[in-house]
Amino acid sequence: MNRNDFPILNEKVYGKTLVYLDNAATTQKPQVVIDALSDYYRRINSNIHRGVHCLSQLATNEFEQAREAVRQYIHAASTQEVIFTRGATESINLVAASFGRTYLHAGDEVIVSEMEHHSNIVPWELACEDRGATLKVLPFNDKGELMLRELETLITERTKIVAVAHVSNSLGTVNPIEEVIRIAHSHNVPVLIDGAQAVAHCPVDVQALDCDFYCFSGHKMYAPMGIGVMYGKAQWLNEMQPYQGGGEMIKDVTFEKTTYNELPYKFEAGTPSVGDVIGLRKAIEYIGGIGLANIAAHEQELLAYTTEKLARIDGMRFIGEASHKTGVISFLVGDTHPYDMGVLLDHQGIAVRTGHHCTQPVMTHFGIPGTIRASFALYNTFEEADALVDAVVKAKNMLS
Ligand code: PMP
């Protein structure tokens, strides 16, 4: 599927054609995104929103058109609810800090799940520490599925927010976030969804979901690094205190009393990464041209095919066997260390990730140091899946 749009896929590593299966870490970029970046710097680079000159107006228009493209992509009600950040990590830190400062008090509670990426744990730990609140954990079962029934008992009248991943980056689990949101809302508790592993793999409609916050990174959806989105319902964002202070986020500054700009600018202090925002729009258009449903179907076929072939290898142990998964396969083989396996796969031209994948509590749950993780994107092929399986067999034989 459209492999030739991605120049890096023709690169060789150790003289072998690259088999790139580390897409959960970051996806490769199509030529249209690469061109959009250089085009921006060649034609219209200038600072936005404050210039009267032509280039500044052109750049501002493109920047705001990108915001509209994001709004459509996630079906937000208004562009006021689309805040540009550096990535999912910054988006979650923004919410944890600003929401925390506004609503969290001593004795309050925050709930995260056991399968969260560190970037949806640590910002909440910091906020809880700062405010004297307590962090509570929604567990998952040994298949890697959230134990939703526990949520009802975890939520109390002191619960201020629930923060859960849409898709787990180390297990591949697609969480029943509709249900999480329904349960939390029935107790008047807002929900933040970490969508970093979802936005490039399944359609997201923040209004249909009715989530309060939805955070993601551009670089995992074929866009440049350094750009991300924090979607938040205007009702929260209007009340929340700003995250960072600086230019652009203010209305009037005095030494006595500063007033803040309207949404979305209130949460966008300083000069944003304009070229990357424009690149994100190109990536959204690129995904739209192929169709998210087609991408999802292709990745599901790759997931089923590869899982079935890997399962035939003696000693294969899958970490994460939820009934609803994206194209993420975490595994261990016999008693080989994931790092050793990763190095031997790399020498065969196969790029996978090994380690805890920034989800140490998941590794603790299973009592393992880490996993080998293969993760798919729209350009991966069945031949690459075969190459992975062959390489794992070879590596296993070398290690045992
Ligand atoms: N959440 C999840 C589920 C992720 O997979 C990642 C990236 N591995 C992040 C958050 C953080 O994204 P970023 O590093 O792009 O800010």
Image (tube, grey):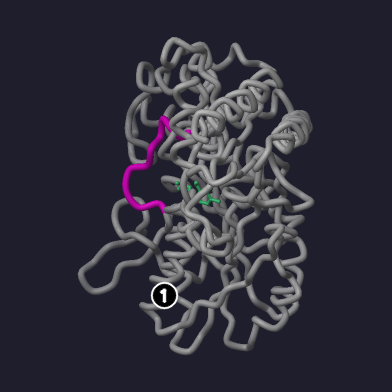
By secondary structure, the bulk of the magenta-drawn segment is best described as: loop
Quadrant of the drawing holding the N terminus: top right
Q: Which residue is mark 1?
A: 101
Q: Is residue 106 visible?
A: yes
Residue positioned most to the front: 400
- Residue 225: image quadrant is top left
User: For the residue marked with disc 1, what is the amino acid?
Assistant: Arg
Above or below, 67 against 14 in this view is: below
Above or below, 9 against 275 in this view is: above
**Rendered residue at 78%/31% (across/down):** 301
Residue 137 drawn in magenta: no
**Rendered residue at 69%/65% (across/down):** 141
**Rendered residue at 50%/77% (across/down):** 135
The span picked out in magenta is: 268-277
Task: Where is residue 46? Give x, y as percent.
Answer: 33, 29
Which of the pair 66/154 is nearer the observer? 154
Which of the pair 364/146 is nearer the observer? 364
Which of the pair 121/69 is nearer the observer? 121
Which of the pair 275/293 is nearer the observer? 293
Mark 1 neighbour class, 10 Å CA radius: few under 14, some 14 to 19, many 20 or more: some
Q: Is residue 62 visible?
A: no
Q: How many marks?
A: 1
Left or right: residue 41 versus residue 204 is left
Q: Secondary structure at mark 1?
A: helix
**Rendered residue at 52%/53% (across/down):** 230
- Residue 181: image quadrant is bottom right
Task: Where is residue 11? Give x, y as percent.
Answer: 46, 13
Left or right: residue 363 versus residue 300 is left
